[in-house]
Amino acid sequence: MVDSDMLIPRPLRTEPGAGAFALTPSTRIAADPASESVRLYLQQTLRGSTGLPVRDAADGADATQRDVIVLRVASDDVALPEGPGGDRSESFRLTVTAAGVEITGGGPAGVFYGVQALLQSLPADVYRKGRVGTGPWTIASTIVEDAPAFAWRGVMLDVARHFRTKHEVMRVIDQLAAHRLNRLHFHLTEDQGWRIEIRKYPRLTEIGSWRTESQVGAHVPGPDGTLIVAGRDGRPHGGYYTQDDIREIVAYAADRFVTVVPEIETPGHVRAALAAYPHLGVHPETPVDVWTEWGIADDVLNADESTIEFFEDVLDEVMALFPSDYIGVGGDECPKVQWEQDPRTQERIRELGLEDEEQLQAWIIGRLAAHVESHGRRAFGWDEILEGGTLSKSATVLSWRGLTGARTAAKRGHDVISAPDDQVYLDYRQSDLATEPIPVSIVLTVDDVFAFDPVPSDLTDDERAHVIGGQGNMWTEHVDSARKLDYQLFPRVAALAEALWSADATGPRDVAEFRGRLAEHVARLEAMGIEYRHEAGPFPWEQRPGVPGRPHSREERAAYINAVTANISE
């Protein structure tokens, strides 16, 4: 049996009872209509790992009957802990006695999260797809009550630098759901690839979805000190999701209460689109290919009305596929050099009554955001969309360059999702070891992620309310397989889940106490088949000897971030 004090994330309240409940061949599951999808999920999980039939209970079965697991959404008079803003839709109570189990949620999502607590209370082998033993499958008697600290608890997955198949994406969704994370930010387009079928513009995937080869490792100084590509793999790389693939992913995630949030990059990071449709660029007379390097290409969108309309068409198809309230429009790392040097763009700036290139970027983002909002959705973009000072307050800001963007956005009345690179960038290296594969930027440990607080200091209560949550970002320039993805995500995602679900609600964070629970939790990761990074460091087959990275010290990184956010600091 597993003690309820070993759950991740840590619950608000646990109360141990006497005895234990045992899953047996006679165990049944009862569910009200709102919880029916959760019943199917629980049955599929338990049948595979335990071999038990866990059939439906008879109509009308309730918690008074023995050997029944009851799943239900609470009536209005049932008290459950409050989540953010007093919301109880994700709150739950798990009650286990020797006679049976009852899970009561504020909504279907709450019931699902109660099921996650139930599964963690069973032996770790419950997460396997097939039987490895015969049990016993016992759960210690307990009461667990819980609710999340933040509404937005997510991970961004970049499938543009290195493509992940739909089955690999759904595997990540399972991993997020098991940790009560509820957003998958789906980064679908980049300089290096376009990953979503747009039927009006088929060349986006015919041309833009693949590149001739990929850079291997980071740039290194050349003989004159200029950064150059150290090596290439000489192997074409590509892939994309059909619209039916997207529908499948979205539906699969919805059954696990994960919302898939799409992002289409603009006005920079668009070289794959320009390779397919050169007229979208500043220099249509000079064709470009899908980029085979990492970094930031100078190629950006032009500001023609026809280009805005092109991306409005793209967003129309995206919004038809993704029911998410939020739609990403990019906005980060947009070089201005082409705009600065192009007479046609300078004329366009004057024609629009803008002051400079920053305001031109804000104008493009503003047009696309308005289009998203005209369809009853909310646009979100990286914190560079604050540049220019003209962003509509309805836009949500994703703060990645530290928390400067989060602080400024909240003060200006924008909702905020925090993803500061120095706390939750999951592509960053996990130690100073020389064996760390392709080490990127600063060291970011499990303990660092555990300490993540998405709310900046020195905000008023009204400003703090604008911070709706946070996410970890998984960029994949150097993550070219599902195994490497596991290595980068885990166990740091477990710490991220704790930071966003539990936060400080149960008292000051205690990293030693968390590590005690994590030591138990890794058995669950192993049963799920997650090849997490072990505390001692990478195994030999996880290393990439001779492939250069780009490590930085925290001081170097902080100086850079302070410089590039000076224009949005308040």
Image (cartoon, rainbow, N blue to C red):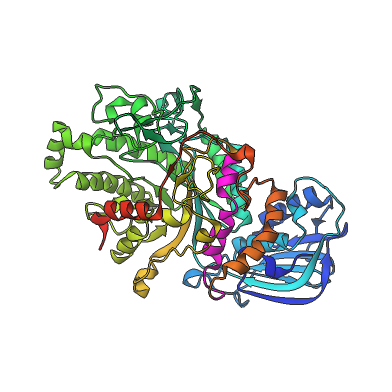
Judged left or right of residue 258, residue 101 is right
The residue depicted at 63 percent of the width and 37 percent of the height is: 541
The percent position of residue 482, horizontal first and vertical second, equals: 59, 39
Q: Position of residue 250 (x, y in %)?
A: 55, 45
Seen from the viewer's position, the closer of residues 469 and 29 is 469
Query: Where 439 sits versus 210, above or below?
Result: below
Q: Is residue 251 above or below residue 221?
A: below
Residue 165 showing in the rendered view: yes
Where residue 102 sits, quadrant-wise, is bottom right
Image quarter (top left, top right, bottom left or bottom right) of the C terminus = bottom left
Please tell me which residue is depicted at 71% across the width and 69% down the height of the picture.
Answer: 4
Residue 232 position in % (x across, y down): 46, 26
Q: Residue 257's quadrant in the figure?
A: bottom right
Q: Which residues are magenta?
A: 483-507
Left-right relation of 497 to 393: right
Residue 225 placement: quadrant:
top left
Q: Is residue 10 visible?
A: no
**Magenta-highlighted stretch: main secondary structure?**
helix
- Seen in the image, is 517 located left or right of residue 101? left
Q: Position of residue 124 (x, y in %)?
A: 75, 56
